[in-house]
Amino acid sequence: MADSSDQNISKVSDAQRTSLERSLSGSDDFLCGCCFDLMVKPTTLTCGHSFCRLCVANWYFTSKKRECPQCRSQWTGNPQTNITLRNLLGKMHSDSISEREAEVMTDEAKKTIDKFDAEISNNIQSESKTAQGQGFCGGICLALGIIVVIYLSWYWSNSDQDLLINKPLVRWTVDDVDQWFTDMGLWTQDYVKIVREKNIGGSLMFELDESNIVNIFNISDSLHKRALINAIHVVKERGVKAPSNLWEFKALNPGWALFLVYGMKDFPRTTLLYLYLFEHDSMFLPFAHVVCPLSEDGPRYDFTYTLPPLTVVQWAEFLPKFLFLPYFLIGEYTWDWLDIHYWTSRFILINCCIMTLLEVNSVVTSMREEHIRSLYPVIKKTLKGYVSILMFTIIWPIIPSFICDCVFYVALYFAPFQAGDQLYRDWTR
């Protein structure tokens, strides 16, 4: 009885030992995720998954992407053979590995692996040189950009006093009146010639009214007549020129200009909603009438007289753009000022195009099931932007005007580069 018990115990322990050895040396842990056979030259990628080196090379040449065949994670550098894994395979499956190597490592396979190693090494060197070059060029561009921003800030801070918005009407010369008419748009070209011919200066501007303006300028268009009468009435009432371009508006309202530039750039819907609620007559209506005009052939609104409320047709055009294409609205408004702000308008238009593409890309990405979590960083970034604008709006009066000017020009001229870089990184991801 004792001998049989000992034999049973011995059999159980032998079975347990065999099971343990099998679990430790199970071949499932050493199978390649591509060919589902024992790995030859096991290569571990950045994500931690391992494959035959030949399988990695074939996957790379087939997909033209440096990503894991199993989880699609991007891998970096030049993945090397996992020596520890290779040694374990050699000890536990020596016979099978020898057969696999004889079967897999043909001359053609070796050429493929050598080609893979050479191409990856060249890519790494090329990327390193490109990164160095981009760093050098980026430093030069940054330095030049800082110089440009400083120059613009200095130039406009010293030239604000020369603007007509600061010059009394009685001191206007014929050139000043010419400039005033020109700033209202292309529709005043014929009237500018009359200003030159009749030497109309600031003192004569005071004598213009509804009774003689038609005769002096030979106005036949009722829209032109109404626009000129309102514009002249405002300039006579104020005693100075009303702002009619970005720089004049900025000179009179530096804080508002800074708020609008950053608001329209980063949060167009919120900014337009704010204008609708709190600046309806002074800012929202002029903007809406420009982007959704009642008449295409009328003169550009000059923001100097009361505009009628939007019609149902205008609202039907405005709301879809506001909800789905807010940057298209800004682009439409900017397009109307191309003849006055030649380069600045083009920078804004480019930024509007890129920001629209970024929004589309964000929507498409967030609709994918695996990217639902990506909404959290977007919301976090948006809230952070709101807080930053709120804080800057509160403290901007105590910030030196030179710094505010620098921030203003950075928002105008550097925004397209920042948006373009973000779009490139999103698409390459």
Image (tube, rainbow, N blue to C red):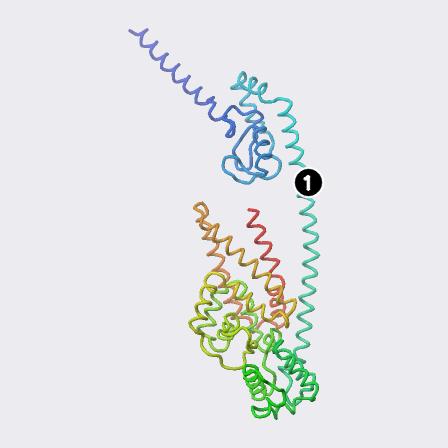
Residue occupying the far front of the picture: 220
Quadrant of the image occupied by residue 178: bottom right
Q: Nearer the viewer, residue 213 or 233?
A: 213
Left or right: where does residue 150 sit relative to residue 36?
A: right
Check the picture and name the quadrant holding the N terminus: top left
Q: In the image, is 95 to the left or to the right of 163? A: left
Q: Nearer the viewer, residue 58 or 270?
A: 58
Q: Is residue 417 above or below residue 396?
A: above
Quarter assignment of residue 105 = top right
> Taking 183 as reference, is 171 above or below it?
below
Residue named by callout 1: 125
Above or below residue 387? Residue 53 is above
Residue 62 falls in image quadrant: top right
Q: How many numbered discs sit on the rendered protein?
A: 1
Q: Residue 16 vs residue 118: left or right?
A: left
Q: Nearer the viewer, residue 226 or 420?
A: 226
**Image coords of residue 297 (percent x, y):** 55, 75
For disc 1, the neighbor class at 10 Å (few under 14, some 14 to 19, many from 20) is few
Of residues 332 and 191, the one nearer the viewer is: 191
Q: Residue at x 33, y 11 (%)?
A: 8
- Position of residue 319 measured from the top left corner of the image (x, y, whole percent): 44, 66
At label 1, the amino acid type is Gln
| Residue 265, horizontal then vertical, whole percent | 54, 64
**Residue positioned 54% across, 25% down in the render:** 39
Q: Secondary structure at mark 1?
A: helix
Give the answer, above or below, for where 84 lies relative to 239. Answer: above
Q: Residue 321, position in %: x, y?
A: 48, 64
User: Which residue shows up at 67% across the image and 85% down it?
Assistant: 194
